[in-house]
């Protein structure tokens, strides 16, 4: 194997690894909240294509063009990695913001449940619509939401998307139960 072949194989291996990292980031593109974020992803895709074109040119190069094409390939690879790092950082920020927002929502609902529980304890068992069982269900759902958020903290790529979908389903169910309890409580508190 020539030095040139070894170099090309090394570049192709690095490119496969970087492309896999890009695909992981791309799998989370539905988190993108604005066009700038999507532009970062589109830019990375374009630089990935540039590197692949330069690698193909290197494969076809003769000795005269080798150094020039090698420099072009190195330049394209550096640009791709810079943009890939920028996209990775942006997606880490988006995942973090999503998780923090959901943690705030869980804490807020937890405080609300604490208020309901205090209200239930103050009221007599006959007058309260919030039974111990209902509060138990909400507490369990709230605990599950916290565990799912913890899973989000450690997940990446497709696993992150699955963890987020599980969290969203749990959260919708929890909010629906909360809405029903509030509606029942408001109905009994209203004067006839």
Image (cartoon, grey):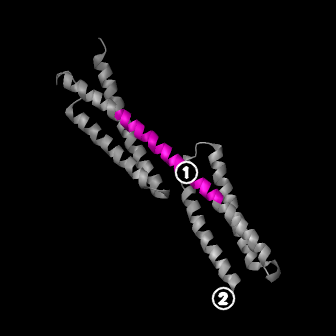
Indicate left or right for 84 with 4 as reference: left
Secondary structure beneath disc 2?
Answer: loop
60 relative position to 101: left or right = right
Q: Which residue is located at x 71 percent, y 73 percent?
A: 55
Give whichever of discs 1 and 2 has the lower sequence position: 2
Between residue 44 and residue 128, name the one nearer to us: 44
Residue at 28%, 42% in the rendered image:
140
Give neighbour class at mark 2: few <14, some 14-19, many 20+ (Cα, 10 Å).
few
Which residues lie in the magenta part? 82-109
Q: Nearer the viewer, residue 67 or 149?
A: 67
Residue 48 percent coordinates (x, y): 67, 63
Q: Is residue 100 visible?
A: yes
| 144 to 104, vertically: above or below | below
Name the foreground residue: 85 vs 57.
Answer: 85
* Residue lying at 72% horizontally and 74% vertically, measured from the top left: 56
Is 57 one of the magenta-colored residues?
Answer: no
Residue beneath label 1, please?
91
**Distance of mark 1 from mark 2, alpha carbons?**
40 Å
Q: Which mark is residue 1?
A: 2
Q: Residue furthest top?
A: 192
At horizontal 62% and vertical 47% (from top left) the residue drawn is 37
Instruction: Give the quadrant of residue 25.
Output: bottom right
Could you tell me which quadrant the N terminus lies in? bottom right
Q: Main secondary structure of the magenta part?
A: helix
Q: Is residue 84 above or below residue 145?
A: below
Q: Quadrant of residue 65?
A: bottom right
On the image, the x and y values in percent for residue 142 come to 32, 40
The C terminus - image quarter: top left
In the figure, 187 relative to 50: above or below?
A: above
């Amino acid at each position: 194997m020539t030095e040139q072949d070894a170099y090309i194989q090394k570049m192709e291996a690095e490119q496969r690894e970087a492309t896999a990292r890009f695909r992981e980031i791309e799998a989370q593109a539905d988190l993108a909240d604005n066009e700038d974020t999507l532009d970062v992803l589109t830019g990375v895709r374009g630089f990935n294509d540039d590197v692949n074109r330069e690698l193909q040119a290197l494969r076809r190069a003769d000795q005269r063009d080798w150094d020039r094409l090698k420099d072009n390939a190195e330049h394209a690879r550096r640009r791709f990695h810079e943009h890939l790092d920028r996209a990775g950082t942006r997606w880490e920020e988006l995942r973090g913001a999503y998780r923090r927002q959901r943690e705030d929502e869980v804490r807020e609902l937890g405080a609300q449940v604490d208020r309901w529980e205090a209200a239930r304890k103050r009221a007599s068992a006959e007058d309260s619509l919030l039974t111990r069982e209902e509060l138990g269900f909400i507490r369990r759902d709230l605990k599950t939401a916290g565990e799912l958020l913890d899973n989000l903290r450690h997940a990446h790529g497709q696993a992150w998307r699955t963890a987020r979908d599980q969290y969203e389903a749990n959260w919708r169910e929890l909010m629906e139960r909360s809405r029903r309890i509030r509606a029942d409580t408001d109905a009994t508190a209203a004067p006839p």
